[in-house]
Amino acid sequence: MIDSGLAGMVGLPGEVVVSSPVLVGVGVGVRGFRFPPEVIVLAVRWYLRFDLSYRDVEELVVERGVEADHATVHRWAQRFTPLLADAAR
């Protein structure tokens, strides 16, 4: 289940997930998914930035109250990495 306080979910020390230009650029692509765009973008960013495995990212999101499987993280990374790369340019 998704924690009700997800909007202010803390990622890394000092990092708080809020609306950003990256979310605006990716927001259209995440419609219809079970999880909010903030969760998907954060999980994919962790995977890409810190060279974590899908299971490591799964553990991180589960610790924050989001029940997502490592296969879900894999699908997010495959689908949203190009969108994040375009939004970052």
Image (cartoon, grey):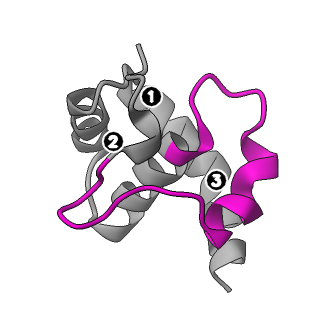
* Disc 2 to disc 1: CB gap under 8 Å: yes
Report which residue position mark 2 lands on: 54
Q: Residue at x 49, y 29 (%)?
A: 72
10 vs 26, left or right, is: left
46 vs 79, left or right, is: left
Report which residue position mark 3 lands on: 80
Q: Secondary structure at mark 2?
A: helix
In the rendered view of the protein, which quadrant contains the C terminus? bottom right
Q: Amino acid at mark 3?
A: Phe
Q: Amino acid at mark 1?
A: Ala
Q: Earlier in the sequence, mark 2 or mark 1?
A: 2
**Where residue 71 is drawn, which disc sits there?**
1
Residue 66 on image: x %, y %: 37, 25
Give the answer, above or below, for where 75 lies relative to 88: above
Packing grade of label 1 (10 A; few <14, some 14-19, many >=20) is few
Packing grade of label 3 (10 A; few <14, some 14-19, many >=20) is some
Q: What is the magenta range?
A: 10-38
